[in-house]
Image: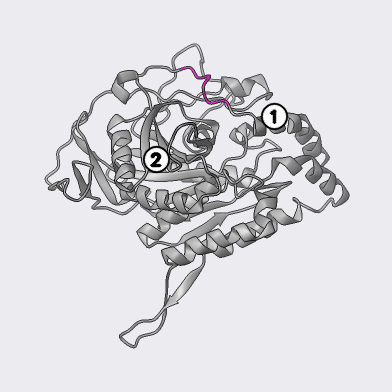
Amino acid sequence: MQLWLTSITTVLSSLLIYYYVNNNNNTTTTITTINNTTATTTLSPHSNDMSTISKYIKHQGSILPTYFFSHGGPTFMYENDSFGNKGAWNKVRTIGQQIKSLPPRDKPDYIIVVSAHWQSSPGGKQPNTIEIGTTWSNGGNGENALIYDFYGFPKHMYAEEFHTYNNKAVADAIKSKLTESGFSAELTDRGIDHGVWVPFKVAFSGYNTQTQPQPDYNEKRALDLPDIAIVQVSLTANDSDFNTHFKLGQALDFFRQNEIWDDLHQKYLKGMVICSGMSVHNLRELGFSMQYMQQNPTAKGLPYAKQFNDLVKSVVESSETETDNTGGDSKSSPTTSSTLLSKLNDLKKDPLLRKAHPTLEHFLPLVVVCGIAQDAKQNVKEIYNDELGSLGWGIYQVGNNIDSKI
């Protein structure tokens, strides 16, 4: 406990700065050319009578699960860092390795990511504006720049690398689908923030600046995900609008259920969605949580952290009884849209929400996950949770496990 308290004291002031400062513009873009691949299919594409996406087919295999990761700060990259969470690290790492190990027919060609650290810029835009990250390099298929949107941390954290590419066809399809669903959607030249690349580095990469032996950083690093594109999608500017973010999840489920055509690579692409936030995120009380744990040596965190984690689990995992009209037994089914969304909105009346999330941007990605679950008629389930100070480390899943496929 004493080691943990010493370590957390050194990062407290930096975390508070990181919490209040928003810097998405100072990025360096590296251009990477992706080799074209070709594939053929005998399936007939849908006509655009059904969608503004001009060419897509119903996904024929197992639908990939959706995940919500609690990503912490940049310290989460390191398995044994006292301000991370080793259990969450291991769970995210396991999920990533399962995804990478899938056979080509099951592996996603791209991952859509929604992070707490990108809300649409409010100036002069519609309140339901969603931005889709792209890169103007290599015709929109270039490498995603990294945004080091954390401040005052040790230098080695700013030397971390994670190399992925974007996909123009996917970004365009997301824009079309969101516009069709009533959003104001636009493409934005932007890198991926630490809410994406930090947990993805844990999930998909095999190295960091503390790895021994160190890789040769004088050589250009290969892509960490050479066969999976990463496309980030923003939240809206309004972090209290659960309805719109639930609807965003419903729209994004389209990309789990269907394969979209990539004209450049002449193939249909399979997609999955991962959202990234925190189940409890109150940096304002991080200092107070240290004092509390000093006075209560057996405590893992402030009482409301576990209380809110338990409350969220009960809400997102809730199901209602559906009567079988044929006279059979009742059965459990995924909570209906109105029920689940109303339960999420009811949280706003509970003081626990604002204790756990003084601002709601780290909770919104879980609302998006709930929208995906409703559209897919699948349940949300908690697959990991823990508390540390004024933070909660919930990890949630929609859909079936993928470990049986490996």
Residue 324 visible within the image: yes
Q: Position of residue 77 (x, y in %)?
A: 59, 33
Left or right of residue 325, residue 232 in this image: right
Left or right of residue 309, residue 50 in this image: left
Task: Give the spatial CA distance, label 2 vs label 1.
Answer: 29 Å
First in sequence: mark 2 vs mark 1: 1
Q: Residue at x 11, y 45 (%)?
A: 42
Q: Which mark is residue 17?
A: 1
Q: Residue at x 27, y 53 (%)?
A: 61
Q: Main secondary structure of the magenta part?
A: loop
Region in magenta: 23-28
Left or right of residue 322, residue 326 in this image: left
Mark 2 surroundings: few (<14), some (14-19) or many (≥20) residues within 10 A: many
Q: Position of residue 268 (x, y in %)?
A: 22, 40
Q: Position of residue 251 (x, y in %)?
A: 35, 49
Q: Which mark is residue 112?
A: 2
Image position of 398 with respect to 99: above or below = below
Outermost top residue: 218
